[in-house]
Amino acid sequence: MRKIIALLALVSATSLARADEGMWTYNGFPRALLEKTHGVKVDDAWLERVRLSSVRLAQGCSASFISPTGLVLTNHHCVETCLQDLSSAKKDYLADGFLARAPADEVKCPVLEANQLVAISDVTARVKKATAGLQGKPFQDAQNAEIGRIESECQTSPSLRCNVVTLYRGGRFDLYRYKRYQDVRMVFAPEFAIAFFGGDPDNFMFPRFDLDMSIVRVYEDGKPLQTANWLAWDAAGPKDGDVVFVSGHPGGTDRQLTMAELEYQRDVSLPNTMATLSELRGALTEFQNRGAEQKRVSSGMLFGVENSLKVFKGERSALVDRTFWAQKMAAEAAFRKALAADAKRGKEALKAYGAIQQAVDLQRNVRPELSYVMGTSGFMSDTFRFARTLVRGADERTKGAAERFPEFQEAKLPAVTQSLFSSAPIDDDFEIFKLTWSLTKLRENLGADHPFTRKVLGQESPAEMASRLVKGTKLKEVSVRKQLWEGGKAAVDASSDPMIQLARLVDPDARSVRKMYEDEIESVTKRSGETIAQARFALEGTSSYPDATFTLRLSFGKVQGWVEGKKAIPAFTTLGGAFDRATGRDPFRLPQSWIDAKPRLDLATPFNFSSTTDIIGGNSGSPVVNKDGRLVGLVFDGNIWSLGGNYGFDEKLNRTVAVDTAAMTEALRKIYGAKELLGEIVR
Amino acid sequence: MRKIIALLALVSATSLARADEGMWTYNGFPRALLEKTHGVKVDDAWLERVRLSSVRLAQGCSASFISPTGLVLTNHHCVETCLQDLSSAKKDYLADGFLARAPADEVKCPVLEANQLVAISDVTARVKKATAGLQGKPFQDAQNAEIGRIESECQTSPSLRCNVVTLYRGGRFDLYRYKRYQDVRMVFAPEFAIAFFGGDPDNFMFPRFDLDMSIVRVYEDGKPLQTANWLAWDAAGPKDGDVVFVSGHPGGTDRQLTMAELEYQRDVSLPNTMATLSELRGALTEFQNRGAEQKRVSSGMLFGVENSLKVFKGERSALVDRTFWAQKMAAEAAFRKALAADAKRGKEALKAYGAIQQAVDLQRNVRPELSYVMGTSGFMSDTFRFARTLVRGADERTKGAAERFPEFQEAKLPAVTQSLFSSAPIDDDFEIFKLTWSLTKLRENLGADHPFTRKVLGQESPAEMASRLVKGTKLKEVSVRKQLWEGGKAAVDASSDPMIQLARLVDPDARSVRKMYEDEIESVTKRSGETIAQARFALEGTSSYPDATFTLRLSFGKVQGWVEGKKAIPAFTTLGGAFDRATGRDPFRLPQSWIDAKPRLDLATPFNFSSTTDIIGGNSGSPVVNKDGRLVGLVFDGNIWSLGGNYGFDEKLNRTVAVDTAAMTEALRKIYGAKELLGEIVR
């Protein structure tokens, strides 16, 4: 045992861990560590209030209640889809901003769902019992089935969302029960030009000058929600060195991956995905030159693509950093040595490393099939997405919970139909553009002679096929989608809609590749990862936090700048800095409202700030709260070093980037004249 | 010594070398090895005739004389620029093909230069003497100066081209003397649709069905060149298993790179370059949708980008192949062991590995500056290229040979002016498109706050700046460029042309980064590479071939298919196969001439074939000759496995892909009715 401890000390010495590392679960929050490192205490009431004030946007962001009247604060980029959906060729809310001066002016977002985490319970024993002694496919099936049962039992009303969350790579399972709010209305959004000032060039950069905020309101039964838990607004913002917390939903991290999996990411998935997204970026940028309307309908997608590219670039930078890689290698080697010395669990865990390597090698070989036969990378289009949901849904809904795909379990159906019945408009040109491009990629990646390519394209060119399908499909109408969903298998089988026909044609192939993937890759890495994770618990105890899973976490740290090479980067920027940086040209163009308001503004007002809190994508929109639980900032980004945080946290460099409440207050008051809104939140 | 030999045996065991590996110099051709492995002898006369029949196209391709009347055979894709230059909105020779029935119809290509290698002499001793005892910058300067002197002394007439070729990474220097032919005229090209049938999807794939050929004629003093050396045309083509030779100009290989350099390629340069090119590809593809004329002017560039992407993809595949990487690691480790045991040279060579690692680490950090400040990646435009040549040329031509940049040495000036005074038309739209895109990349890669970005862009957006420069510059006129070149420094300094102004503005920064690069990176890796290469010679003798350098090489092998997984790929395809594969849609659309001629064709005629000869990019257009020195094929591609050939040759998989002379004969006769041309070449 002494030997194991010595080896683990070595692991720590070579790892990147620091005091502020950790995206902690609310039921595993390390109060003692916080007190030890920062001298700050939080109690149960503090934790419960902040948790219940936290909001998850089901589409992939974080947010928080900021008034007892259902107002929710999040990022502008988290409601960009809504702004686009509400816009038309006549009125562009994305470009011009939005402000409802009275509740009657608040407009419902077609696809925006807010979730509030009301309860967490440990269901590990139940899941483990159901999978005891199983391997491979039976293991996966049993686990899916048990998780489906637990979720269904919990799901007593459509206004609940129940998810079993897999933590520690399957080492622990917690049931998260959320209150769902599907009536979410737009209240305030600034102009895109200031929400994303600096555009892609400044994304993940700091110093930064962005008002990346928006305010929506949650409605219940047609009325603004009355809520007991919300964060009090601190209009002064934080000070340099203040201890702060971030409560939000980090989407995913890969800090416990084996070297085999990291190598796959470094050598295969990241560079290939980046090449594909780069090409799409180039095509989209040029598509935007076709005209103003094309620009409008494609801006959201372009933002998403550029954002992903920056993220992957940051992640890849960490993996190709020779020092970082060597540290990861040393840490794994040390841990494997510790395992070799552990008679009880070591052997099985070491075998798991081999199994993962084998699964990863297989994944390398079948990667094009996973993306283009199993996945929908070749059919990039809203109407194909609807068609697949309708075709799959018709089949899956005839099955029992044990046989059904996880995404069609009863508990998931409300979310499925919310997306399927979205009233967001669909642009034919853009659909054809996306489908043409992605069919071309399908042919390129599988090869022109692949049976699936031949089956899909026949004698048509990608452009011809895309045009025929998009012009011919009726799935652009919500009513047609409703009819097919409600008509079930009979209606879908009888449909002669060309997009439905395509979805039907490719479904058997997609299912067959999915089966192979689940049986030979996913379940192997999952089960083996669990074995390793369990061995790690046995050795390290519960002192660590699980990899992020887009579930609520609490991070802590300090407001702090950093040192870049030899240059000190201060923690704060000011409103005045935005004016200094503006060139008058996109993406460094300030909106007219700002130029007009300049004389009235206090230019020394803190605008954006950086902190040592540990976050990752999905944390966008998270509240930054101080030790008193008051709102002082709004997370909207991390610096470029934060992206390597996917694999490890480096407290010297990794920074969260947030909008200061002081700047939001100044802007709402003096630029947007939103006095009714301020009256609700600043008390 | 026994120990060293044992270690070298280990190197061989773990390397990928096979019998047919090797791009041999004509003065180092391994006749004994050829006889041993294939039972075939070649004599001095054979070698001299094939060498003198071989042609280098200065723009980056290979070719061969195929008649005593100056006819030269190369690939269609090697003259694509010429076809584009000769075309206009009215007549598109790229799409429609070209056939001159009489010499009077042959049209001069604006920028096509043919070179014939007439002599090789060893100048190693002279270069080594000039650099003896030097390191770093002084070493580099002395070497450049001596090479400049040797070339200038040789360069007794503008119809000669003299190049000192660095072989074995500086282990040996040979002076190559070429006869230059600058009057090259278009004689025959088929339609793009059959030259590149299958397009990008089929590029580097096999089975293949491409008539990727063209025929040009070299003129001297306004008359067709009379030449004594040319390859006799074998209209029957080769048989499966025949021994064949490829005589051409492989552009470059990296088979002797250290692991530090390979790691840089795997992790940094390849993935980053691929992401950038992918984005450009997407933008170009969509630019083509603007209209037929935009499509025409951008097709050549799009082809180049897609071709490069495939090459890099193939290369990266080799480097991320876990087995391949492990073999390379083992080979370097074994060689380093051998060095450690070599008292005479070992220590210095081992130190050289460390120096290379350090230089590569520096290169990682300054990569954006190398591309965007030193290089022209941020100023992608023909007119900026002219401007840089004019501004640089004006300065450099005032200097002596020792201080001058290598590309402006007297011997190089004819090629510089040929390119500068090209009459190829310049399209404003396309110039603006390219410049906008590349300025955006400059800002992205250096960062918006980089002093160079600020200096270049000021307050302008990339689009505004590109439009102003392209619309304002007069460099589109050949006469203006001539005037500025001939006016020298005074004329260039006095010019108010906006593109010249930009080139002047950025030149000091570009020169300063170039100096750093040459002093701290290039000269270090060069010198260290030479140290290692010399140690390798000392240990391995002269039994190896040097990495490719876009100079004439001779490879040998057999006509042979290969086994892919469990599937045997036959060596030959047939004309009939093209008809089976056609869908009627680009890029699988056969030209009308083929459809019309189908009933007359012998569909069993061999079309394309694969062979085990060792080639790489630059070999495009190389003749394939049989043991009698007769022409049996025309290299136009390699299979996907040939791309990893950049780092090592795998005889099991690596294949050259060529057009069969039988197919060329059948097509010229029955599809194109080119009986005059056939009369000149088939005797």
Image (cartoon, coloured by chain):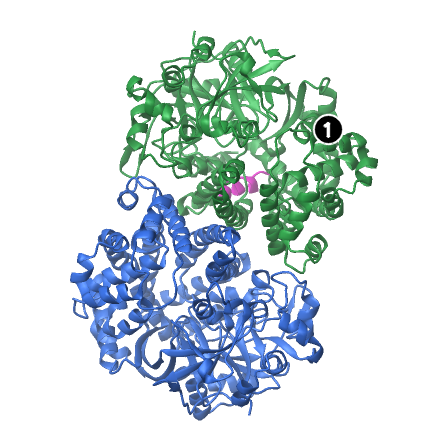
Chain colours: A blue, B green
Which residue is depicted at the point 41% across and 82% down?
A: A218
State which chain disc 1 sits on: B
Q: Nearer the viewer, residue B180 or B460?
A: B460
Magenta span? B332-345
Task: Classify residue B530 as left or right of residue B62.
Answer: right
Query: Can residue A470 be seen in this snapshot?
Result: yes
Q: Quadrant of the C terminus of chain B?
A: top left
Q: Indicate whether B571 appears above or below B311.
A: above
Which residue is depicted at the point 82% across and 40% down?
A: B494
Task: Classify residue B195 as left or right of residue B81.
Answer: left
Specify few, some or many for label 1: CA neighbours under 10 Å numbering under 14, 14-19, or 20 or more: many
The x and y percentages for residue A401 are 19, 70
Query: Can residue A64 be seen in this snapshot?
Result: no
The x and y percentages for residue A606 are 65, 78
Q: Nearer the viewer, residue B336 or B98?
A: B98
Q: Indicate whether A481 appears above or below A40.
A: above
Q: Which residue is mark 1?
A: B148
Q: Indicate whether A189 appears above or below A506.
A: below
Quarter assignment of residue B176 = top right
The x and y percentages for residue B294 are 52, 40
Given the image, on which type of amino acid does mark 1 rest?
Gly
The x and y percentages for residue B478 are 69, 31
Task: Classify residue A75 as left or right of residue A165.
Answer: right
Q: Judging from the image, what secondary structure is the residue with disc 1 in? A: helix
Magenta span contains residue B335:
yes
Magenta span contains residue A569:
no
